[in-house]
Amino acid sequence: MELDQLWQSTLGEMEVQLSRANFTMWMKNSSLIDKKDGVFYVALPNNFAKEWVEGKYQKNILSILRARDESIRKVEFVVGGEAMFSKKQTLIPSETEMGMELEFKNDPETNLNPRYTLSSFVVGPSNELAVAAASAITEKIGKYNPLFIYGGVGLGKTHLIEAIGNEIVAKYKKKIRPKYVPSEQFTRDIVWGLRNDRIESMKKKYRDVDVLIVDDIQFIGGKEKTEEEFFHTFNALYENNKQIIISSDRPPRAIPILEERLRSRFEGGFVADIAYPEYEMRVAIIHSKLQESRRQLSDVIIDLVARRVKRNIRELEGVLKKLTFYEEQKGIAVTVKTAEGIIEKAVQNLSKHVDELVILKTVAEFYNVSIETMTSPNRRKEIVEPRQVAMYLLREISDLSYPYIGEKLGRDHTTAIHAYEKINKEINRNPALNQKILTIRDMIFKS
Ligand code: ADP
Ligand code: MG
């Protein structure tokens, strides 16, 4: 078999094994470039893809290739080859995707929105763990109980937890009954039940399910009656081996005024975070969204959007809609300059310009140190964290360059890069630090 033909058939099989979004993200721009002494060389467009495919799909690829060519012993991955230059765009919609534009309505029984599916959810390093746990649950209900997924606004929490529900419906038909509820609605139901002497029927509503999916649980913090009812509902379900899935914008430890007994229940389960997507993933998500809506944008514009809109996928979708709308209205391709204007306007509110001095002042105030100490050569331990957090926030909020940030704090640019990366990693592992940063952010934006 020719190499190309062999690879096409391998891809065909991979496509069946992976979700559509995953396949598009990782395998689409690959090619089989060489075969030597029983080793196949597969080219991928960048290091990011290489590492991912090597780590996740090497075995599968090898076994698929081996089934077609017994002489093969090994697969090696390289960056480059044709893959780098491939402009193949798979923007031809399939028949099922043609229906994507339809309005979606929540299912009255499960309250799930069928728009959210696992196959339309792009997977990458920033959400990999959460998706793996989600998929495991659809295989075995109750496997991780509760599953607690947290992450910032617009990063896909609702999409993912509803997708688990939809997957369960598709897989088990009516045998396993999920129910989705935003925590505000849970609160409303409890309040209504208490007021109208119908609390028993409200309890039944939430206990009579096999999978309870509660979105944005952080809102129940401090609402004592709701917390109490939720605690009992939780226990009733848990003891009956029912699955509980929870989302939150922060880890359990960082939800203010949450009863300790609930917090420890949450922490007793499987806690996974969704972080900000990397550039490559943002590009993949853009492709996936354009494909869903059967629209196109040039690679230059896609790159521009991916570079500019980093922190919120909902925002990313908004920008894409504006750009494609512009093109449809005008009947011409949007220029880089116009696109920049549209993007700038759309993200203005998001990264509203914050004075760097406000950031420094707020961090200093929060940690109770002076700006002078923070920017001095002082290496005392108490100063290290505020200094690193300041550098992190200068980058995050104001998008300043590393050399500039370094200079502001009397350091060089490598120290600034190190500080940013360290904090960026740490916030996903250290809920206390994450909470501090959320608080400082709030202070900055309120000032
Ligand atoms: P959150 O609940 O975390 O605020 P959502 O789940 O509402 O965020 O996601 C915001 C939008 O971004 C939704 O339209 C969702 O479909 C989309 N989205 C988020 N993450 C992904 C992803 N990994 N792949 C595809 N779409 C995503
Ligand atoms: Mg949400």
Image (cartoon, helix red, strand yellow):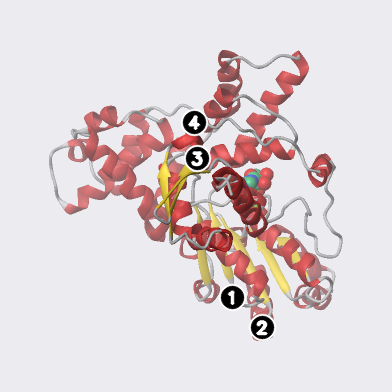
Residue 428 higher or lower than 389, as above or below: below
Single out the residue that lies furthest toward the bottom. 239
Q: Earlier in the sequence, mark 1 or mark 3?
A: 1
Query: Badge 3: few (under 14), some or many (20 or more) residues near its Cα, within 10 Å?
Result: some
* Residue for badge 4: 307
Where does the C terminus fall, quadrant-wise? top left
SS label for mark 2: loop
- Contact, mark 3 vs mark 4 (Cβ under 8 Å): no
Q: Amino acid at mark 2?
A: Asn
Q: Residues within 10 Å of mark 2 (few under 14, many from 20)?
A: some
| Residue 321 shown left or right of residue 313 in the figure | right
Q: Callout 4 environment at 10 Å: few (<14), some (14 to 19), or many (20+)?
A: some
Give the residue number, with chain letter if any, for mark 3: 280
Callout 1 touching callout 2 (CB < 8 Å): yes
SS for dot 4: helix
Label ID, residue 241: 2
Residue type, mark 4 in image: Arg
Measured Cα–Cα span from mark 3 to mark 4: 10 Å
Does any atom of ligand 1 lie closer than 8 Å to the CB of label 3? no
Give the spatial CA distance, label 4 vs label 2: 45 Å
Which one is closest to the eye, mark 1 or mark 3? Answer: 3
Asked whether the beta carbons under mark 4 and mark 2 sit within 8 Å of each other, the answer is no
Q: Which mark is residue 145?
A: 1
Q: Which residue is at 31% across, 38% downward?
A: 391
User: Disc 2 versus disc 3: distance between alpha carbons?
Assistant: 39 Å
- Residue 223 visible in the current orientation: no
Which residue is nearer to you in this view: 53 or 277?
53
